[in-house]
Amino acid sequence: MRFFYAPMTYHAILCAPFGQLGLIADADALLAVHFLTEPQPVLTPPPGSLAAEAAHQLSAYFADPTFRFDLPLRPVGTLFQQQVWREIAAIPFGETCSYGELAERTGSVARAVGGACGRNPLPIIIPCHRVLAQRGLGGFNRSIESPTVSIKHWLLVHEGALLL
């Protein structure tokens, strides 16, 4: 889960309320969602492709924060990262938990959980924005600065987990 500055080969580039997203998918699974920092032309995915379905579901989520994603995913990471991502995926809509709480569930420490959150290749879909610091929002997208934390803030307000 990183901001990407250089052009990559995306299967879809779509507009989000906070910027643009680049999607990478193969025929079987969604592999990555990237926050794009430089404006790029919208790239409509081929009709019937998994990238098209992912773009459709992300648009549905932006219109209705209670929308539940139903996509085949293949996040690549270590066994620990996979464990953390499964715990993150279980955080219900409109709720949050702390890095420390996730650390307890995974038998780890908050800093390691934060590192796993930062390497989540499928943000929004695996909702790492729902993981907060003990005091405040904490980081997002391997950063504690804008624009990443402002995206986390937007997502939490969108879901009703954080008030303006």
Image: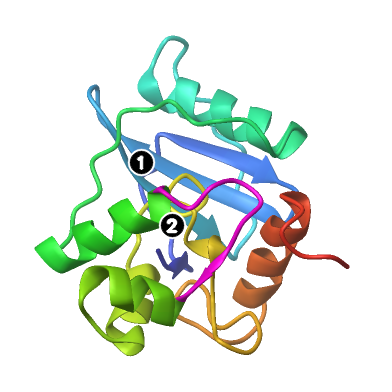
Name the image quarter holding residue 67: top right
Q: Could you tell me residue 151's position as x and y percent?
A: 66, 65
- Distance of mark 1 from mark 2, alpha carbons? 13 Å
Name the image quarter holding residue 37: bottom right
Q: Which residue is mark 2?
A: 7
119 left or right of 160?
left
Q: Is residue 48 above or below residue 76?
A: above
Q: Say which residue appears at 25% left-offset and 30% top-offset.
A: 26
Q: Which of the image's four quarters has the N terminus?
A: bottom left
Span shown in magenta: 90-98
Q: Which residue is mark 1?
A: 24
Q: Secondary structure at mark 2?
A: loop
**Front residue of this view, candidates 50 and 99:** 99
Q: Which of the image's four quarters has the C terminus?
A: bottom right
Q: Is residue 23 above or below residue 149?
A: above
Q: Secondary structure at mark 1?
A: strand
Residue 96 part of the magenta segment: yes
